[in-house]
Each structure stands twice: as structure tokens, then as C-alpha cells.
Image: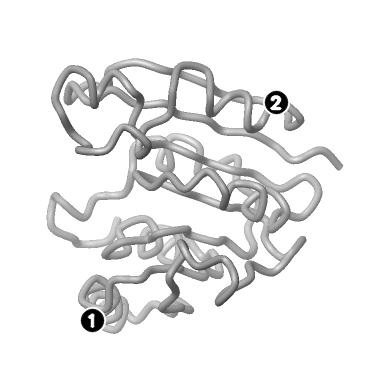
Amino acid sequence: IIDMPETQEPAQLLVEYLSLLPKGKVLDVAMGKGRNALYLASNCFEVVGLEKDKEAIEVCLTEAKRLALNIDIRCVDLEDLQSYQIEKSAYDVVICFYYLQRNLIPSMKAALKPGGFILYDTFLIDQHIKTGHPRHREFCFEHNELLRFFIDFRILYYREGQDPKGTYKASLVALKPV
């Protein structure tokens, strides 16, 4: 396992499903400081990371260099769908953790090759209602909303509720039809 600070540990959902993922090209949407991108690169995946925050990108690049890992990082504003188009049918896996932009989901689905996997894990509306975080309700999925977005995929795993740390999340692992 790669040596990273605790806050940089890969997402549990990704760790649990790593062995099912086809080795190949992965798109990490809103990768932040790259905890999941670094983990995937260290497990022989070809990773493309999308992120707007230049400081977060620098953290990831520094860590990737230290670990001798190659990650293709693209500094993009995901809220401006005109400025950056995600390549269609280009990825074996798409991951998105703690980011929600509903109008981006069709592009994420289209980015997957047939038979490709998506792992999506982010806040559920209960998190906003019970804790006030995230501040804006629209940054949380409503009940069953994530499931409805991927109802045309083969659902391998779906869960809504509190994780062991007490965070209310919606989590999904699904397979794009061939």
C-alpha cells in the first residue's frame, strides 16, 4: 500500500471493489488532492483526473512524483460544460466521490466504454438536514436519486445511509450495458 497521510486514504468503496475493476483507463471526476487517483495509479491503472482547484492539483502532482506514479491531471471547471467535453466511450472506469453536479452525470455515463464500471459516492440529503453540511441542499442526492440516474445500468451495489464515521451518503457501483 502507498504511504499517504490518513486524510489521503482511498475511499472505502473503491478499495472494496478494486479487484472487480477492469485494468485500463480510469476517469476521476473532481479528484481533489488525488487520494483515489494515486491509489488507482499505484495499482496499475491509467488515471485521468479532473479538478478545478490548482492547489489540490499541486498536492496530487507532488505526491505522484514522490511515489513515481503517472497521473494525467486536467485543470478544468466542471461547472462549465462548454469549456471541457469529457471524451465519449473512452474509459473503463469512472469514479466520483463527494461531488455532485447533476447535469454532468450524462457525460460521465457516456464516457464509459460498454461494460465499464462507475463508482459514485457522495452526500445524501439526510446529511444536509441533520448537520447543515453541505451548506447547499443541491450538493446532496435526494433519496433514490442516484439510483434513478443509473437505472439503465446493471446495479452491482447501492446503499443509502450512514457510513461508519456517521456521514449520510448515497453509494453506487454499476456496470454500463454492453
* Residue under the point 18% across and 60% down: 4
* Residue under the point 62% across and 52% down: 108
Res 147 → quadrant: top right
Per the image, label 2 sits on a secondary structure element best described as loop
Is 134 above or below relative to 53? above
Horizontal side, residue 89 vs residue 104: left or right: right
Of circles 1 and 2, the one toward us is 2
**Mark 2 residue type:** Ile
Q: Residue furthest toward the right?
A: 178
Q: Pointer 2: residues within 10 angstroms few (<14), some, or many (20+)?
A: few
Residue at the disc numbered 1: 62
* Disc 1/disc 2 C-alpha distance (Å): 39 Å
Residue at the disc numbered 2: 151
Q: Pointer 1: residues within 10 angstroms few (<14), some, or many (20+)?
A: few
* Residue under the point 66% across and 48% down: 106
Horizontal side, residue 39 vs residue 96: left or right: left
Residue 157 place in picture, x, y as percent: 56, 23
**Mark 1 residue type:** Thr
Res 148 → quadrant: top right
Horizontal side, residue 51 vs residue 120: left or right: left
Viewer-proximal residue among 48 and 132? 132
The N terminus lies in quadrant: bottom left
Residue 59 place in picture, x, y as percent: 21, 74
Q: Earlier in the sequence, mark 1 or mark 2?
A: 1
Q: How many marks?
A: 2
Label drawn at residue 110: none
The C terminus lies in quadrant: top right
Viewer-proximal residue among 160 and 63? 160
Res 61 → quadrant: bottom left
* Residue under the point 44% across and 80% down: 70
Viewer-proximal residue among 16 and 146? 146
Per the image, label 1 sits on a secondary structure element best described as helix
